[in-house]
Image (spheres, grey):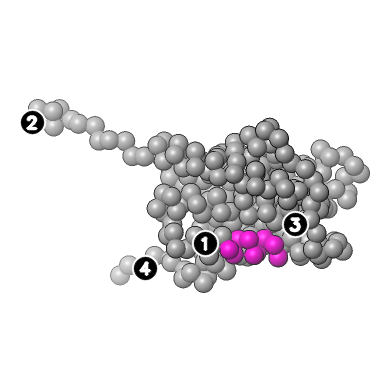
Amino acid sequence: MTTAPFEPDLARRLAAEAIGSFFLFAGVLGSGVMAEALSGGNVAIALLANTIATGAILYVLIAMLGPYSGAHFNPAVTLAFAIRREFRWKDALPYVGVQLIGGILGAFAVHLMFDLPILQFSTKARTGIGMLAGEAIASFGLVFTILVTLRRLPASVPASVALYIAAAYWFTSSTSFANPAITIVRSLSNTFAGIAPMDVPGFIAAQIVGTLLAVLVGGWLTADPPPILGESDLSR
């Protein structure tokens, strides 16, 4: 007797995506608020604290919710899997919808916890070719990390993604948003991790470019090599 594979229905998968997005986005924004408040104006210390909290919550959420929804929490990841035909296109829009809804609620929860106006818009400018290049590279690296690690070391995905994002916070000019949904949500928070609404379209375009390149290169790299013909085959 064999056990049937674990396949949650769409409602449970969407719930997992919404909960994960809520805590991920709240983790990014809330740790930014706390870090800025406690760092005494030292931006490097604030960014370090924001980085550690983001990496930590990412690991927990992917390990916990991955078996239920795949732990996308990111329209770019959903798009990548759909292009690779590893995810149903008909489920992509609901996934993106709950990622946004969960994330927006996470931002509102942060504002509530820290006694800030619930509805606000960021004034932090993040623009220029350097920032956009940083987002394209960050998004390529994130999606590439997921696709390649899943292929041979699936158990390492939570740690790999968390560590990649922690590193990319520091080696990319944009501090690695690498996520269209969180980019939109961060425009709704005039805090340390915010982005001005007018800069959102450019970031999302760069993220999509990075994602598409990662799908292309990752697909080529992880494709099964053609079989090697033996002497008996060559002699036929």
Considering the image in quadrants, where does the C terminus appear?
top left
Residue 158 located within the stretch drawn in magenta? no
Crowd band around label 2 with a 10 angstrom C-alpha radius: few (<14), some (14–19), many (20+): few
Q: Which mark is residue 188?
A: 3
Which tag, 3 or 1, sits closer to the chain's start? 1
Which tag, 2 or 1, sits closer to the chain's start? 1
Place residue 137 in its image quadrant: top right
For the point 12% across and 30% down, which residue is it? 232
The amino acid at mark 3 is: Leu
Of marks 2 and 1, the one in the foreground: 1
Q: Where are the magenta residues, as a range?
A: 97-105
Which tag, 4 or 3, sits closer to the chain's start? 4
What residue is disc 4 on? 4
Q: Position of residue 207 (x, y in %)?
A: 59, 44
What residue is disc 2 on? 236
For the point 41% across and 54% down, which residue is it? 86
Crowd band around label 4 with a 10 angstrom C-alpha radius: few (<14), some (14–19), many (20+): few
Residue 149 shows in the view: no
What residue is disc 1 on? 93
Q: Position of residue 37 (x, y in %)?
A: 88, 50
Distance from Cα at disc 4 to Cα at disc 3:
43 Å
The amino acid at mark 4 is: Ala
Place residue 30 in its image quadrant: bottom right
Q: Secondary structure at mark 3?
A: loop
Crowd band around label 3 with a 10 angstrom C-alpha radius: few (<14), some (14–19), many (20+): many
Query: Is residue 196 rendered to the left or right of residue 147?
Result: right
Distance from Cα at disc 3 to Cα at disc 1:
21 Å
Q: Nearer the viewer, residue 120 or 101?
A: 120
Q: Are marks 2 and 3 in contact (CB under 8 Å)?
A: no
Query: Can you name the residue that lies furthest to the left here?
Result: 236
Of marks 1 and 4, the one in the foreground: 1
Distance from Cα at disc 1 to Cα at disc 4:
28 Å
